[in-house]
Amino acid sequence: MTALLDELKRGGARVTVLAVGTWLAANADLGRRLLADGHELGNHTQHHADIKTMKPQLAYAEISACAEAVRAVAGSIGRWFRPSQTQYATPTIKSAARRAGYPTCLSYDVDPRDFTDPGPSAIVSATLAAARPGSIVSLHCGHEGTVAAIAPILTGLRARNLRPVTASDLFA
């Protein structure tokens, strides 16, 4: 994550990091750094389990536990929630998210599937082929290919007069 934050800083990019609660609790220092670097912190469930198959109470527990991990680092639960292991929030997920304090569930329209480690060039190519004004790109921390792809992605976006922004800036 440090290398990813370094690349984003070098590229002058600000993003929203939707963190898994267990990761955030174990890496609170990185959570504080991302906030200090001007990024935004949001909720991506406590354990990154398949939330669309969960019963309502378990879905709520996943969201609310991560909200507390975010609060411990950021001082608030943050504004954004994105469900784990699904692109779209179901009515059950939306209800649990609202109950936990998130009126809006984020999705994404660009998924270069970087978590499968296809290599930096595949990540860059897929991202730039799909990104449009207003796109939300799903990228993952902890993958070397993603880190290596950041600088070329930023360069490619700039060449098209696009720039990454936080979700709050996108929806302002």
Image (cartoon, grey):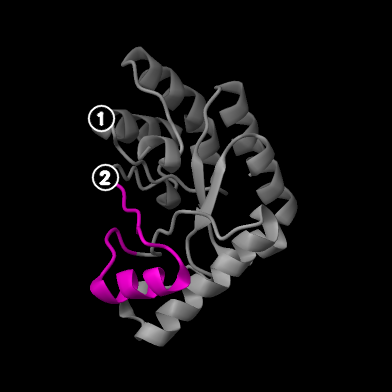
Tell me whether circle 2 and circle 1 mark residues in contact (CB < 8 Å): yes
Q: Answer with left or right where residue 109 lies relative to residue 58.
A: left
Whole-percent x, y for residue 163 in the image: 40, 24
Residue 71 picture quarter: bottom right
Whole-percent x, y for residue 102 in the image: 42, 63
Number of residues whose C-alpha sits closer than 10 Å to that of mark 1, classed few (under 14), some (14–19) or many (20 or more): some
Judge whether residue 23 can be spotted in this image.
no
Residue at the extreme top of the image, as rendered: 159
Judge whether residue 148 can be spotted in this image.
yes
Q: Answer with left or right where residue 168 lies relative to residue 9.
A: left
Whole-percent x, y for residue 125 in the image: 32, 30
| Disc on res. 24 | none
Which residue is the site of mark 1?
A: 132
Q: Secondary structure at mark 1?
A: loop
Q: Secondary structure at mark 2?
A: loop
**Magenta stretch in the rendered image:** 86-109
Image quarter of the C terminus:
top left
Residue 55 picture quarter: bottom left
Which residue is the site of mark 2?
A: 109
Name the one closer to the observer, 89 or 8.
89
Residue at mark 2 to residue at mark 1: CA–CA distance? 9 Å
Name the one closer to the observer, 36 or 113.
36
Residue at (65, 34) in percent of width and height: 37
Q: Is residue 89 above or below residue 41?
A: below
Q: Is residue 162 above or below residue 40?
A: above
Residue at (56, 73) in percent of width and height: 65
Residue at (36, 84) in percent of width and height: 56
Residue at the extreme right of the image, as rendered: 29
- Which amino acid does the dot numbered 2 rest on? Asp
